[in-house]
Amino acid sequence: MTEPGGTSSGTSGADDIGVRIVREVAAELDRSPMELEPLAGLVDIDALSSLTTTQSVNVSFEYEGLRVTVHRDGSVGVERLDDRSMR
């Protein structure tokens, strides 16, 4: 579920976080998720899920020209690198 401000609400599981990231990025870019590079080729989704569910950290990385941040509550935010405004 996407919250106001372009973040999705947290749920558990590596598959869930990967799906949420791809959906948020695809929506921001107005593209089909199938048009994006495979996320698993860029980040270890299991490790990302583990970090954000067992540690009090936020994790950010670049994907498809966006900065993706997975927050400690499991929400996902995307930010265009050219304007730095959270979506």
Image (cartoon, rainbow, N blue to C red):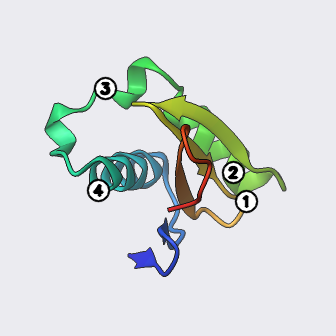
Q: Amino acid at mark 1?
A: Arg
Tell me whether circle 3 and circle 4 mark residues in contact (CB < 8 Å).
Answer: no
Residue at mark 4: 27
Q: Amino acid at mark 4?
A: Ala
- Sequence-wise first label, 1 or 4: 4
- Sequence-wise first label, 3 or 4: 4
Depth-wise, is mark 2 or mark 4 nearer the camera? 4
Residue at mark 1: 72
Depth-wise, is mark 3 or mark 2 nearer the camera? 3
Residue at mark 2: 52
Q: Position of residue 14 (x, y in %)?
A: 48, 46
Tell me whether circle 2 and circle 1 mark residues in contact (CB < 8 Å).
Answer: yes
- Sequence-wise first label, 2 or 4: 4
Q: Amino acid at mark 3?
A: Pro
Tell me whether circle 1 and circle 4 mark residues in contact (CB < 8 Å).
Answer: no
- Sequence-wise first label, 2 or 1: 2
Question: Which residue shows up at 57% across the image and 47% down it?
Answer: 83
- Sequence-wise first label, 3 or 1: 3
Question: Which residue shows up at 37% across the image and 47% down it?
Answer: 25
Q: Position of residue 22 (x, y in %)?
A: 34, 45
User: Does residue 38 lie above or below 9 as drawn?
Assistant: above
Q: Position of residue 59 (x, y in %)?
A: 70, 42
Residue at mark 3: 38
Tell me whether circle 3 and circle 1 mark residues in contact (CB < 8 Å).
Answer: no
Q: Amino acid at mark 2?
A: Thr
Distance (Cα) linking label 2 and label 1: 5 Å
Distance (Cα) linking label 3 and label 4: 16 Å
Quarter where residue 35 is shown = top left
Q: Is residue 20 left or right of residue 68?
A: left
Depth-wise, is mark 1 or mark 4 nearer the camera? 4
Secondary element at tag 2: helix
